[in-house]
Amino acid sequence: MRVLVVDDEKRLAEGVRRGLEAEGFAVDVANDGVDGLWRARENDYDVILLDLMMPGMSGWAVCQTLRSEKNWTPVLMLTAKDGEWDQVEALETGADDYVTKPFSFPVLVARIRALVRRGSPERPVSLLVGDLRVDPGSRRAWRGETEISLTSREFSVLEFLARNAGQVVSKRDVIANVWNDDFDGDANIVEVYLVRLRQKVDRAFGVVTIETVRGAGYRLRAGDA
């Protein structure tokens, strides 16, 4: 099994390399994100161990870039940040698992082996609606060849519309699937996000694909804009 370790802490990376080689792994090491990204592109690995915080190019950026390029090699994030939102961001960027530093080496090896057993399953395919492409795997969207900058919540609303392209979805449907059934805030929050999406996804490109169906809800047109 071939593993790539990407960490700017050279002593830690070398210690992990020696330990993994003693466990029978073949290990390559990169000490910055740029080199790590190059190695991940040029070689086939069973697992990539990726430090979260690195100068030049962070682990977040490396992982997101790989996922945008359809590289689904399992990624295990190594992070000294143990806040729950740091962990959430790591997973939403495309990582498959994470461990916080300092970590138990036997646990690290067990998690690597678990990822290897799991393999690299096919990730969610892009949703195509006319010239609009929504990629749930990388949480990115494009109109033609132009990428659209979206917040996490904006993307979630757009993804829900794209999964139901051509169908009318109610405000309650959007809230239940993007927020949750227990949401007790103002339901007009949905309209706020639809206004933002129309500006970014439609008006910026001179098209109208996100429609309001009076008295019923919203619809993303499935045909050509």
Image: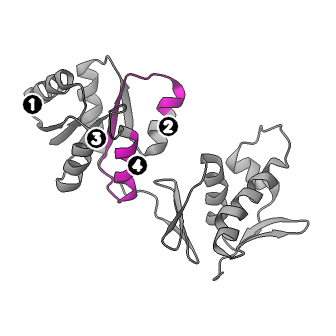
Determine the secondary structure under disc 3: helix
Q: Which colour scheme is used?
A: one colour
Q: Which of disc 1 and disc 3 is earlier in sequence?
A: 1
Q: Where is residue 77 in the image (x, y as percent from the top left)?
A: 35, 34
**In percent of the image, x 31 and y 45: which residue is there?**
74
Q: Which of disc 4 and disc 3 is earlier in sequence?
A: 3
Q: On the picture, is 204 further left or further right than 102?
A: right
* Contact? badges 3 and 4 (CB < 8 Å): no
Residue 66 belongs to magenta span: yes
**In percent of the image, x 69 and y 60: which residue is there?**
197
- Residue 213's place in the image compared with 85, above or below, is below
Q: Identity of the amino acid at label 3?
A: Gly
Q: Which of disc 4 and disc 1 is earlier in sequence?
A: 1
| Residue furthest bottom as drawn | 224
Residue 10's disc number: none
Q: Nearer the viewer, mark 1 or mark 4?
A: 4
Q: Which of disc 4 and disc 2 is earlier in sequence?
A: 4
Q: Position of residue 41 (x, y in %)?
A: 23, 55
Range shown magenta:
60-87
Residue at mark 3 to residue at mark 1: CA–CA distance: 22 Å
**Mark 2, residue position:** 89
Residue at mark 1 to residue at mark 4: CA–CA distance: 28 Å
* Contact? badges 3 and 1 (CB < 8 Å): no
**Residue placed most toward the observer, 89 or 181:** 89
**Mark 4, residue position:** 64
Res. 99 visible in picture:
yes
Q: Where is residue 193 in the image (x, y as percent from the top left)?
A: 74, 53
**Mark 1, residue position:** 21
Res. 164 visible in picture:
no
